[in-house]
Image (cartoon, rainbow, N blue to C red):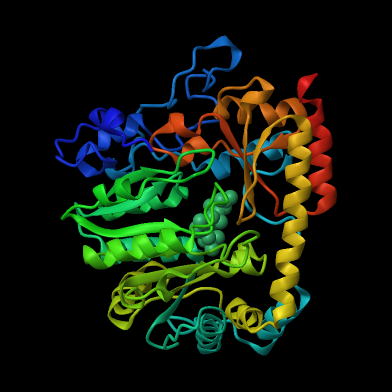
Amino acid sequence: MRSHADTSSQEGSSDPHRGHAVCLGRGDQMEHDRHALSVGYLLPAKDGRRTGSAGGVPHSRPMSTARSPHLVSRLQGFGTTVFAEVTALARQYDAVNLGQGAPDFDGPDFIKEAAIEAIRRGDNQYCRMFGEPTLNSAIAEHQRRFYDLDYDPDREITVYAGATEAIFATLAALCETGDEVVMFEPFYDSYRACLAMAGARERVVTLEAPSFSYEPETLERAINPRTRAILLNTPHNPTGKVFTRAELEHIAMLCCKHDILAISDEVYEHLVFEGEHVCLASLPGMRDRTIVISSAGKTFSFTGWKIGHTCAPEPITRALRTAHQFVTYCNGTPFQHAIAAGYRADDAYYETFLEEYRERRDRLCRGLARVGFGVLEPAGTYFVLTDIRPLGYQDDVEFCRMLPEKVGVAAIPPSSFYVNKEAGRHLVRWAFCKTLPMIDEAIRRLEGLGS
Ligand code: PMP
Ligand code: GLN
């Protein structure tokens, strides 16, 4: 496990803890600009130069250090998300898009019908600020059914415009300027931007490829008196790691010992192929200090409906709602009715959902291995990371820029999910929330990579 003592010196921090984990924040903003998350990674720079090392231009990363006019300093450097960039490239070259995690199929008909019925019935106006009552109740039933956790649907469950808004509202409501949040890299890209908007700082512990493990001591050393929370994501995007019960028990112990909160992004809770999904809040001492975040977009394959939620103890929920009410207030009334039907689906729905994804995972992993990638088979989520070095490539950004044009397939460069970008430079993320014919077509195209 790398402690980052080597990289933290670049961060301009005079922090006594910096030998243990990278910490960035407000005061480090200009430095942050130079470590930008997704600044025009794939698109041409404004002056016409291509970003990356394509065309013999020496690789320089990140690609832009220019200040964006009008943009506040705390958001300088965030540029355009890698998902928007890759999707634009995929469209430009009519590529099979294994980049953004959006299914190329719809969720079940009974949920669609429930939405249509709600629209016809006239459930089309603002709903209750913290969620349509039937959805809050369905989420409470789901938490009891799968995790044996009791939440009061009216006082402890809140519905948002996707997990994305839930993450934003959570960090905006709970973090003071200068607070620190410990998180693992690679991390879902919105975490860092939301922390920046909250004026908080991240302290990053690296999940090291290929096992994506970490030293427990490194995690503990990342905690200090300014730490407000540990933010984790299990099952984990983009590695497919499912945190083990032992890892989560250790995280729980640290949260209790240091009296800090846990923010647990569990949007892929029903996509676990190996091992078990442990809801962090179900561990001893954790229910009262954990904010569980999830998304109906993943569980029911309606990412465009943007329905997400939090489960958290009442005093924390009150804080979250103070932020949420001024961000969206509420979202997608008819869809909330429909998703309530989803969460109440019988076991057969959840089992079939998982088995269909297992088949997609196996099909894509086998195909990528046949093409020659080093496949890091995921235990969960609908993403797989591959090592591109066996095919002679070294740089994820360069590879993902070339791919749509060269073979008509799009994928995500995961270094955009790292502070320490070198740790992810040899990896590429592929999404398998796609129909089998689409996966087969992607593999057929990728077989042309060598030519
Ligand atoms: N967290 C993780 C780990 C994700 O991968 C995503 C997006 N797919 C989200 C949160 C956001 O979910 P939503 O689409 O519901 O906003
Ligand atoms: N979470 C999705 C992914 O990881 C993307 C969501 C988005 O485009 N913001 O692919």
- Side (left or right) of 291 relative to 277: left
Q: Position of residue 62 (x, y in %)?
A: 42, 27
Q: Position of residue 260 (x, y in %)?
A: 25, 64
In this picture, is 141 found above or below 15? below
Residue at position x 62%, y 62% from top? 272
In this picture, is 417 found above or below 5? below
Outermost residue toward the front?
246
Q: Position of residue 11 (x, y in %)?
A: 25, 32
- Side (left or right) of 7 relative to 147: left
Q: Quadrant of the N terminus?
A: top left
Residue at position x 61%, y 76% from top? 335
Question: Which one is nearer the viewer's eye here, 342 or 86?
Answer: 342
- Is residue 94 in view from this perspective? no
Q: Quadrant of residue 171?
A: bottom left
Q: Quadrant of the C terminus?
A: top right
Residue at position x 51%, y 78% from top? 147
Residue at position x 77%, y 31% from top? 371
Outermost residue toward the top?
56
- Is residue 211 in view from this perspective? yes
